[in-house]
Each structure stands twice: as C-alpha cells, then as structure tokens.
Amino acid sequence: MGFFYESTNFTGWAIWLFILFALMAFNELGRSTKWGGIILFLIVPIGLTIFVWPTTAAPGNEYGTGTWFNWVKTYSALAGCLGFMAIRYIPSLAKKKWVLCFPPLILAINILEAAIRDFQCFTYGAWNGAYVDNLWVMSGSWNIMNGIAGLLNIIAICGWVGIFISKDKTKDMIWPDMIWPWIIAYDLWNFAYTYNCIADHSFYCGLALLLSCTIPAFFIKKGAWLQHRAQTLALWIMFVMTVPSFADRIAPVATTHNPKAFFILSLLSLIANVALVIYQFNKIYKNKLNPLKDEIFVETKAYKKVVEENR
C-alpha cells in the first residue's frame, strides 16, 4: 500500500471487500436470470437517467462525474450488457456471424475511449499533478505508454467467430479464444489506466472492479469474461454516477501521487501487451491463420476446457 496508495485501516479494507463481493453478487444476479439482467441493466438505468443522474452527474459537479467520459462510458457499458443479453436470449442471433462482431466492437470501443483519455491526460501538461474537471491527474510519459498499450490490446482481440451460447440454463456468452494471457494483459492495462486517469478512485474502480470480473472468469464461469466485465463495469459506473461522493468523501483511499508508481504500472502494462501481441502474431504466422476468420488458441488447454464445459 505504501508505494501505490496511502495506508487505509480495517474499515477501509472492509468497505473495499464489500464493494468487491457486491459487484460479484449483482453480476451473478444479472447473469443467472433474464429478468435480473433486464431490471439491472434496463429498468434501473432508465429511472436513474430521468430522476437521478441529471443532478448527481451534472456537468462541472465537484466530484468529476459530469465529464463526457463518464456519460459515454456509462451508456457504452450498458449497451454492451443489453447487446450481450440479446445474443444470449434470442437463439437466432448467436447463429449470425455478423452479430458476433458486436462483442469485439463494443469491447474495442470501450478500450479506445480509455486510451484516448490517457492521451488526453498527457495533453493537460499537469507534470506535477493538478485537479482537472475536479479529478486529480498527473501528466507524464506513463499516459503515452499506457495509451499505446490500450491500442495494442485492441489489436490482440481475436477469435470472436467462435463465440457461442453455453448449454446450461444461464445461457452465458462464451468466448473461448479469450484466454488468460489476454485477460491478464487487459487487467494490467486497465488498472494502469485507472491509476493514471482516475488516480484517487482507482482503489475501487481499478483493483476491486477488475477483480470482480476476473475472479468469476477464472473460478465461476470460465469463458464468459467479457460478459462479467460488461456487467460489473455497468454496475460500478451506475453506482458512481448515483453516489459520486463515495470515493472522495465516504471512503477515500488516495494514491501516493508518486511518479515512479505511475511509470512502473504503465511500463508493466506496455510490456505485457507487447508480449501478448508478439505471442499472438507468432501463432497466426506459424499456423497460417486469418485473425478475422479463425480462432487463434484452439490447441491450448484453456480453450479446450472452456469448450468442453459449455458446449
């Protein structure tokens, strides 16, 4: 904690754990029942859009939730949840190849939004740290490194032609080619992004939020990482838009504002994503694959296990 974050007490960790498990629990509710998903990702957001967010996420508010990025991120995450639900529950959609372009497209858009935000934070010129739109940011080379890492992560999105719906009653959207190297590279990139651009909120929207989708992807429903990610992201950002004071006033855990911490995280993110792209393109070249038409990791144990468990 001392290098990346200011120290927190038992209460702070208890709140962090509550956020982690609440996100996982609501994700399971949205995943396990059709009506749970409809209520969480359609009915509740409509009510909040009309009656709550115009006040709590008004432009220029003191918590920084009124920026273009927060509004775009909210609705793009919700669009992903609803789109994935349509693919899961309308049998004819999952059989159409053009429909399967939606998951990688919405994922790429979300990553691109964040990469642009990293580059934007660099342009602020806040070399010693400053409040911009009521959020503390520190500009530096880390923004460029991590922005590039995000673009590489988009390039490494592969195998969406193999997306299918699981045979069990939850009808999860399974993407077997999205194996653990991509997920880890994404997590490192996204954590570095939150640390760079939402620094003093990243204890929650970085660590807790990423674990809330990564844990289910490894231990609860393998192969459904994107579904877990879309739903936990939508849940978190709806909460932040509704209770904007949470990370600043209610349960704040600030970063140390140490330039070395920013640099190290973004360097790790860049290295991981460069390695991922090299690994992936080596497989494409070696096996003479077309990344727009073929799945890349069909011979791996991770891929085979996901298919065996869900098809």
Image (cartoon, grey):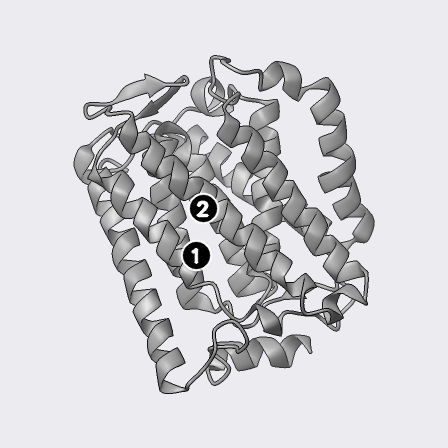
Where is mark 1, residue-wise? 154
Where is mark 2, residue-wise? 112
Residue 99: name its quadrant. Answer: bottom right
Q: How far from the left and from the top, in percent, is residue 222?
A: 57, 67
Element on which disc 2 rests: helix
Residue 58: name its quadrant. Answer: top right
Relative placement, left or right, of 196 versus 293 is left
Which of marks 2 and 1 precedes in the sequence? 2
Using a 10 Å C-alpha cutoff, classify the residue at mark 2 as few (fewer than 14 neighbours), some (14 to 19) or many (20 or more). Answer: some
Residue 204 - label: none
Element on which disc 1 rests: helix
Relative placement, left or right, of 12 versus 143 is right
Hey, what amino acid is under mark 1?
Answer: Ile
Q: The C terminus lies in which quarter of the figure? A: bottom right
Name which residue lies at 80% across and 52% down: 34
Q: How far from the left and from the top, in percent, is residue 178?
A: 50, 67
Q: Is residue 51 above or below residue 280?
A: above
